[in-house]
Amino acid sequence: MSYTLNKQVAGEFDDVVTETIDALEDEGFGVLCDIDVQATLEKKLGEDFRQYRILGACNPGLAHEGLEADVELGTLLPCNVVVYEGDDGDVVVSAVDPQTLLGITETPAVEPIGEDARDRFEAVFGRL
């Protein structure tokens, strides 16, 4: 079972990051954090790594619903979306599948939230 949604995107890395953030915002997600993994690994370990950004995306309405249903759900938030250089030169956008992620809670009230979030992520991927 896959735990991610993925799409290869042609374009410049920084442009794809911007397009991804814009598409997330169009679907009601804010980016709470933006981690530059390449820069972090260089700074902390002196290691070279491909361009790789982790975007912590959160839809406040869905998060509120989920937290009302299961207060421990915060341990699974925000949903991570990564943008990285693929091996073939394309840029890959990958997101955790919220439906799969929330399925681990075994809380029936969060199932429709996971479905809604997945639909929104699929709409994001459709815009890229």
Image (cartoon, helix red, strand yellow):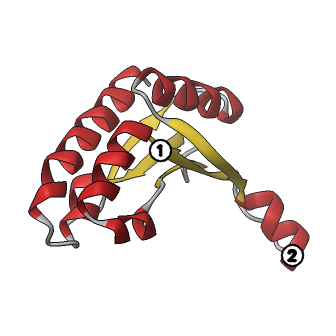
Answer with left or right where residue 65 lies relative to residue 57.
left
- Name the one closer to the observer, 15 or 33: 33
Extreme residue in the front direction = 68
- Name the one closer to the observer, 51 or 68: 68
Type of amino acid at the residue the image marks with label 1: Cys
Helix, strand or loop at mark 1: strand
Type of amino acid at the residue the image marks with label 2: Lys
Picture quarter containing residue 43? bottom right
Please state the total of marks drawn on the protein image: 2
Disc 2 to disc 1, C-alpha distance: 27 Å
Residue at image coords 46%, 34%: 29
The residue labelled by disc 2 is 44
Answer with left or right where residue 110 lies relative to residue 28.
left
Residue at image coords 61%, 46%: 32
Sort mark 1 into few (<14), some (14-19) or many (20+) by Cα contacts within 10 Å: many
Picture quarter containing residue 104? bottom left
* Quadrant of the snapshot with the C terminus: top left
117 above or below 22?
A: below
30 above or below 68?
A: above
Sort mark 2 into few (<14), some (14-19) or many (20+) by Cα contacts within 10 Å: few
Q: Position of residue 113 (x, y in %)?
A: 22, 47
Residue at image coords 80%, 65%: 40
Q: Position of residue 102 (x, y in %)?
A: 25, 62
Q: Is residue 81 visible?
A: yes
Q: Position of residue 14 (x, y in %)?
A: 70, 32
Between discs 2 and 1, the one toward the N terminus = 2
* Quadrant of the snapshot with the N terminus: bottom left
58 above or below 124?
A: below
The residue labelled by disc 1 is 58
Helix, strand or loop at mark 2: helix
